[in-house]
Image (cartoon, grey):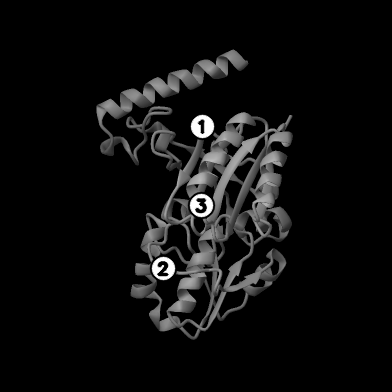
Amino acid sequence: MESIVVAALYQFKAVTDPANLQQTLKDLCKTQEILGTLIVANEGINGTVSGSRQAIDVLHQFLLAQGFDRMEYKESFAPEHTFRKLKIKLKKEIVTLGVHVDPRDHVGTYLEPEQWHEFIQQDDVIIIDTRNDYEYVTGTFEGAIDPQTKSFGEFPQYIQEHLKAAKDKKIAMFCTGGIRCEKSTSYLLQEGFKEVYHLKGGILNYLAHIPDEQSLWKGECFVFDRRVGVGHGVNLGDTAMCFGCGHPLFAGDTDSPKYEEGVSCPHCYDHTTEEQKARFRMRQSQHVLKRMVKE
Protein backbone atom coordinates (compact mmCIF):
# COMPACT_ATOMS: atom_id res chain seq x y z
CA MET A 1 0.00 0.00 0.00
CA GLU A 2 1.48 3.36 -1.08
CA SER A 3 0.80 5.52 1.95
CA ILE A 4 3.67 8.02 1.67
CA VAL A 5 3.51 11.12 -0.52
CA VAL A 6 6.74 12.28 -2.20
CA ALA A 7 6.63 15.99 -3.09
CA ALA A 8 9.20 17.60 -5.41
CA LEU A 9 9.00 21.38 -5.55
CA TYR A 10 10.83 24.58 -6.39
CA GLN A 11 10.23 28.24 -7.11
CA PHE A 12 12.51 31.16 -7.86
CA LYS A 13 11.20 33.95 -5.63
CA ALA A 14 12.89 36.66 -3.57
CA VAL A 15 13.20 35.55 0.06
CA THR A 16 13.96 38.48 2.38
CA ASP A 17 14.89 36.41 5.45
CA PRO A 18 16.00 32.92 4.33
CA ALA A 19 17.44 32.04 7.76
CA ASN A 20 14.05 32.59 9.40
CA LEU A 21 12.29 30.56 6.71
CA GLN A 22 14.85 27.78 7.19
CA GLN A 23 14.13 27.55 10.92
CA THR A 24 10.35 27.72 10.46
CA LEU A 25 10.47 24.93 7.88
CA LYS A 26 12.67 22.84 10.15
CA ASP A 27 10.20 23.16 13.02
CA LEU A 28 7.19 22.46 10.81
CA CYS A 29 8.72 19.40 9.13
CA LYS A 30 9.85 17.91 12.44
CA THR A 31 6.37 18.35 13.89
CA GLN A 32 4.81 16.73 10.83
CA GLU A 33 7.44 13.94 10.67
CA ILE A 34 8.45 14.96 7.15
CA LEU A 35 11.78 13.66 5.84
CA GLY A 36 13.90 14.79 2.89
CA THR A 37 15.77 17.91 1.86
CA LEU A 38 14.68 21.50 1.32
CA ILE A 39 17.13 24.20 0.22
CA VAL A 40 16.40 27.83 1.06
CA ALA A 41 18.22 30.84 -0.43
CA ASN A 42 17.60 34.47 -1.25
CA GLU A 43 16.52 33.31 -4.71
CA GLY A 44 13.83 30.85 -3.57
CA ILE A 45 13.22 27.29 -2.42
CA ASN A 46 13.95 23.82 -3.83
CA GLY A 47 13.73 20.25 -2.62
CA THR A 48 12.05 16.87 -2.34
CA VAL A 49 10.39 15.55 0.81
CA SER A 50 8.24 12.62 1.86
CA GLY A 51 5.51 12.31 4.45
CA SER A 52 1.92 11.39 5.14
CA ARG A 53 -0.87 12.89 3.05
CA GLN A 54 -1.81 15.22 5.88
CA ALA A 55 1.80 16.27 6.56
CA ILE A 56 2.56 17.12 2.93
CA ASP A 57 -0.69 19.07 2.67
CA VAL A 58 0.30 21.12 5.75
CA LEU A 59 3.71 21.90 4.21
CA HIS A 60 2.18 22.75 0.83
CA GLN A 61 -0.35 25.12 2.35
CA PHE A 62 2.34 26.78 4.46
CA LEU A 63 4.49 27.49 1.40
CA LEU A 64 1.51 28.86 -0.51
CA ALA A 65 0.81 31.20 2.41
CA GLN A 66 4.44 32.37 2.26
CA GLY A 67 3.93 33.53 -1.33
CA PHE A 68 5.28 30.44 -3.10
CA ASP A 69 2.15 30.36 -5.23
CA ARG A 70 3.85 29.56 -8.53
CA MET A 71 5.78 26.48 -7.45
CA GLU A 72 6.69 23.75 -9.87
CA TYR A 73 5.10 21.09 -7.67
CA LYS A 74 4.79 17.36 -8.34
CA GLU A 75 3.67 14.44 -6.22
CA SER A 76 4.33 10.72 -6.47
CA PHE A 77 3.77 7.90 -4.01
CA ALA A 78 5.76 5.24 -2.18
CA PRO A 79 5.06 2.49 0.38
CA GLU A 80 7.44 4.09 2.90
CA HIS A 81 9.56 7.19 3.45
CA THR A 82 11.99 7.71 0.58
CA PHE A 83 14.47 9.57 2.82
CA ARG A 84 16.24 8.69 6.04
CA LYS A 85 16.71 12.18 7.47
CA LEU A 86 15.39 15.73 7.37
CA LYS A 87 17.73 18.42 6.06
CA ILE A 88 16.72 22.08 5.71
CA LYS A 89 19.73 23.78 4.15
CA LEU A 90 20.57 27.48 3.82
CA LYS A 91 22.61 28.16 0.67
CA LYS A 92 23.59 30.91 -1.76
CA GLU A 93 21.72 29.19 -4.61
CA ILE A 94 18.83 26.73 -4.57
CA VAL A 95 20.62 24.91 -7.40
CA THR A 96 24.32 25.66 -7.81
CA LEU A 97 25.39 26.85 -11.24
CA GLY A 98 28.19 29.08 -9.96
CA VAL A 99 27.46 31.80 -12.53
CA HIS A 100 25.05 34.64 -11.85
CA VAL A 101 21.77 34.31 -13.73
CA ASP A 102 18.24 35.29 -12.77
CA PRO A 103 15.53 33.02 -14.17
CA ARG A 104 12.95 35.52 -12.95
CA ASP A 105 14.22 38.00 -15.57
CA HIS A 106 14.65 35.75 -18.59
CA VAL A 107 14.36 32.03 -19.16
CA GLY A 108 13.97 29.65 -22.09
CA THR A 109 10.65 28.79 -23.71
CA TYR A 110 8.70 26.23 -21.68
CA LEU A 111 7.39 23.16 -23.50
CA GLU A 112 4.70 21.00 -21.95
CA PRO A 113 5.39 17.22 -22.19
CA GLU A 114 3.24 16.79 -25.31
CA GLN A 115 4.92 19.79 -27.01
CA TRP A 116 8.36 18.53 -26.00
CA HIS A 117 7.57 15.09 -27.39
CA GLU A 118 6.88 16.56 -30.84
CA PHE A 119 9.60 19.21 -30.72
CA ILE A 120 12.60 16.96 -30.04
CA GLN A 121 11.73 14.80 -33.05
CA GLN A 122 12.65 17.67 -35.37
CA ASP A 123 15.94 17.14 -37.19
CA ASP A 124 17.27 20.64 -36.50
CA VAL A 125 16.94 20.47 -32.70
CA ILE A 126 19.96 19.91 -30.44
CA ILE A 127 18.84 18.03 -27.31
CA ILE A 128 21.02 18.47 -24.22
CA ASP A 129 20.77 16.55 -20.97
CA THR A 130 21.76 19.08 -18.27
CA ARG A 131 22.16 16.41 -15.58
CA ASN A 132 25.30 14.66 -14.39
CA ASP A 133 26.97 11.77 -16.21
CA TYR A 134 25.69 9.03 -13.89
CA GLU A 135 22.13 10.31 -14.28
CA TYR A 136 22.48 10.22 -18.07
CA VAL A 137 23.65 6.60 -18.02
CA THR A 138 20.64 5.57 -15.93
CA GLY A 139 18.25 6.90 -18.58
CA THR A 140 17.78 9.74 -21.10
CA PHE A 141 15.90 10.85 -24.21
CA GLU A 142 16.68 9.42 -27.62
CA GLY A 143 19.36 11.51 -29.32
CA ALA A 144 20.25 13.55 -26.24
CA ILE A 145 23.81 14.83 -25.76
CA ASP A 146 25.65 13.92 -22.57
CA PRO A 147 27.82 16.89 -21.42
CA GLN A 148 29.69 14.41 -19.16
CA THR A 149 29.57 16.72 -16.15
CA LYS A 150 30.14 15.57 -12.59
CA SER A 151 28.19 18.50 -11.15
CA PHE A 152 25.89 21.23 -12.45
CA GLY A 153 28.60 23.79 -11.72
CA GLU A 154 30.60 22.35 -14.66
CA PHE A 155 27.81 23.11 -17.13
CA PRO A 156 28.89 26.68 -18.07
CA GLN A 157 32.34 25.34 -19.02
CA TYR A 158 30.73 22.73 -21.25
CA ILE A 159 28.76 25.46 -23.04
CA GLN A 160 31.87 27.59 -23.54
CA GLU A 161 33.93 24.69 -24.89
CA HIS A 162 31.39 22.76 -26.97
CA LEU A 163 28.31 24.79 -27.83
CA LYS A 164 29.39 28.33 -28.68
CA ALA A 165 29.08 27.64 -32.43
CA ALA A 166 25.42 26.66 -32.01
CA LYS A 167 24.06 30.06 -30.97
CA ASP A 168 21.67 30.18 -33.92
CA LYS A 169 20.45 26.58 -33.50
CA LYS A 170 17.37 25.33 -31.67
CA ILE A 171 18.52 24.12 -28.25
CA ALA A 172 16.25 21.87 -26.18
CA MET A 173 17.28 21.17 -22.59
CA PHE A 174 15.90 18.92 -19.88
CA CYS A 175 16.60 17.79 -16.32
CA THR A 176 14.88 15.79 -13.57
CA GLY A 177 12.30 18.25 -12.28
CA GLY A 178 12.94 21.40 -14.30
CA ILE A 179 14.98 23.54 -11.93
CA ARG A 180 18.41 23.06 -13.51
CA CYS A 181 16.95 24.08 -16.86
CA GLU A 182 15.62 27.32 -15.37
CA LYS A 183 19.24 28.33 -14.84
CA SER A 184 20.83 26.62 -17.85
CA THR A 185 18.41 28.22 -20.33
CA SER A 186 18.78 31.58 -18.60
CA TYR A 187 22.55 31.23 -18.93
CA LEU A 188 22.35 30.41 -22.65
CA LEU A 189 20.14 33.41 -23.33
CA GLN A 190 22.61 35.54 -21.36
CA GLU A 191 25.38 34.18 -23.61
CA GLY A 192 23.55 35.20 -26.78
CA PHE A 193 21.80 31.98 -27.84
CA LYS A 194 18.65 32.74 -29.85
CA GLU A 195 16.26 29.78 -29.54
CA VAL A 196 16.37 28.01 -26.20
CA TYR A 197 13.65 25.63 -24.99
CA HIS A 198 13.19 23.40 -21.96
CA LEU A 199 10.86 20.67 -20.73
CA LYS A 200 8.45 22.17 -18.20
CA GLY A 201 8.44 20.15 -15.01
CA GLY A 202 11.35 18.06 -16.28
CA ILE A 203 11.57 14.34 -16.92
CA LEU A 204 9.21 13.55 -14.04
CA ASN A 205 6.47 15.57 -15.72
CA TYR A 206 7.09 13.82 -19.06
CA LEU A 207 6.96 10.36 -17.47
CA ALA A 208 3.72 11.28 -15.72
CA HIS A 209 1.98 12.36 -18.93
CA ILE A 210 3.43 10.44 -21.89
CA PRO A 211 2.42 6.74 -22.14
CA ASP A 212 5.21 4.18 -22.17
CA GLU A 213 4.30 2.91 -25.65
CA GLN A 214 4.65 6.41 -27.16
CA SER A 215 7.61 7.57 -25.13
CA LEU A 216 10.97 8.79 -26.40
CA TRP A 217 12.49 8.21 -22.96
CA LYS A 218 14.85 5.24 -22.57
CA GLY A 219 15.77 3.73 -19.21
CA GLU A 220 14.87 5.15 -15.81
CA CYS A 221 15.04 8.61 -14.31
CA PHE A 222 17.55 8.80 -11.49
CA VAL A 223 16.12 10.43 -8.36
CA PHE A 224 18.06 11.43 -5.28
CA ASP A 225 16.23 9.32 -2.73
CA ARG A 226 15.78 5.66 -1.75
CA ARG A 227 13.68 4.93 -4.84
CA VAL A 228 16.88 5.52 -6.92
CA GLY A 229 15.09 5.33 -10.27
CA VAL A 230 11.54 5.81 -11.52
CA GLY A 231 9.89 4.88 -14.80
CA HIS A 232 6.74 5.83 -16.68
CA GLY A 233 3.90 6.92 -14.47
CA VAL A 234 6.65 7.93 -12.01
CA ASN A 235 6.49 4.36 -10.73
CA LEU A 236 9.30 2.73 -8.78
CA GLY A 237 12.04 1.42 -11.08
CA ASP A 238 14.67 -1.32 -10.82
CA THR A 239 17.79 0.84 -10.53
CA ALA A 240 19.89 0.18 -7.41
CA MET A 241 22.22 2.63 -5.70
CA CYS A 242 25.30 2.52 -3.53
CA PHE A 243 24.24 4.14 -0.28
CA GLY A 244 27.89 4.75 0.51
CA CYS A 245 28.36 7.30 -2.29
CA GLY A 246 24.94 7.66 -3.94
CA HIS A 247 26.11 6.41 -7.35
CA PRO A 248 23.74 4.18 -9.35
CA LEU A 249 24.84 0.57 -9.65
CA PHE A 250 25.16 -0.94 -13.09
CA ALA A 251 25.50 -4.51 -14.38
CA GLY A 252 28.35 -6.30 -12.60
CA ASP A 253 28.88 -3.64 -9.90
CA THR A 254 27.39 -5.77 -7.13
CA ASP A 255 29.64 -8.70 -8.13
CA SER A 256 32.79 -6.61 -7.58
CA PRO A 257 34.91 -7.33 -4.49
CA LYS A 258 34.72 -3.57 -3.86
CA TYR A 259 30.95 -3.75 -3.37
CA GLU A 260 29.52 -3.96 0.13
CA GLU A 261 25.86 -3.14 0.60
CA GLY A 262 25.37 0.29 2.12
CA VAL A 263 29.13 0.80 2.41
CA SER A 264 30.99 0.90 -0.90
CA CYS A 265 30.99 0.09 -4.61
CA PRO A 266 33.53 0.17 -7.47
CA HIS A 267 32.78 3.88 -7.96
CA CYS A 268 33.73 4.96 -4.42
CA TYR A 269 35.77 2.19 -2.76
CA ASP A 270 39.14 3.79 -3.50
CA HIS A 271 37.95 7.27 -2.48
CA THR A 272 36.72 6.61 1.06
CA THR A 273 38.78 5.95 4.18
CA GLU A 274 38.45 2.93 6.45
CA GLU A 275 36.99 5.24 9.08
CA GLN A 276 34.26 6.32 6.65
CA LYS A 277 33.57 2.72 5.68
CA ALA A 278 33.23 1.77 9.35
CA ARG A 279 30.74 4.59 9.83
CA PHE A 280 28.78 3.44 6.76
CA ARG A 281 28.73 -0.15 8.13
CA MET A 282 27.26 1.09 11.39
CA ARG A 283 24.60 3.05 9.51
CA GLN A 284 23.80 0.02 7.34
CA SER A 285 23.46 -2.28 10.36
CA GLN A 286 21.01 0.18 11.95
CA HIS A 287 19.03 0.32 8.71
CA VAL A 288 18.87 -3.49 8.50
CA LEU A 289 17.76 -3.70 12.14
CA LYS A 290 14.94 -1.19 11.55
CA ARG A 291 13.84 -3.15 8.47
CA MET A 292 13.75 -6.39 10.47
CA VAL A 293 11.66 -4.74 13.19
CA LYS A 294 9.14 -3.54 10.59
CA GLU A 295 8.90 -7.03 9.07
Asked whether, in this view, residue 147 is left or right of residue 2, the answer is left
Q: Are the residues at dot 2 and dot 1 in contact (C-beta closer than 8 Å)?
A: no
Q: Dot 1, crowdedness within 10 Å: few (<14), some or many (≥20)? A: few
Residue drawn where x is 40% and y is 32% of the image: 255
- Disc 2 marks which amino acid? His
Q: Nearer the viewer, mark 1 or mark 3?
A: 3
Name the one closer to the observer, 222 or 154.
154
Name the one closer to the observer, 220 or 115.
115
Spatial distance from mark 3 to mark 2, Cα to Cα?
Answer: 20 Å
Residue drawn where x is 71% and y is 61% of the image: 214
- What mark, if any, has residue 157 been given in the picture? none
Among the two numbered marks 3 and 2 on one chain, the one whose residue lies closer to the N terminus: 3
Describe the element under mark 1 as helix, strand or loop: loop
Question: Residue 60: where, in percent of width, then height?
Answer: 68, 45
Residue 190 falls in image quadrant: bottom left
Describe the element under mark 3 as helix, strand or loop: loop
Residue 272 falls in image quadrant: top left
Among the two numbered marks 1 and 3 on one chain, the one whose residue lies closer to the N terminus: 3
Specify whether residue 81 is in view.
yes
Residue highlighted by disc 2: 100
Question: Residue 99: where, in percent of width, then height?
Answer: 39, 66
Spatial distance from mark 2 to mark 1, Cα to Cα?
Answer: 31 Å
Seen as rendered, the residue at the extreme top is 293
Name the one closer to the observer, 58 or 236.
58
Residue drawn where x is 71% and y is 46% of the image: 61
- What mark, if any, has residue 85 been given in the picture? 1
- Disc 3 marks which amino acid? Asp
- Disc 1 marks which amino acid? Lys
Asked whether, in this view, residue 178 is left or right of residue 58, the answer is left
Q: Are the residues at dot 3 and dot 2 in contact (C-beta closer than 8 Å)?
A: no
Determine whether 193 is above or below 50 in the image.
below
Describe the element under mark 2 as helix, strand or loop: loop
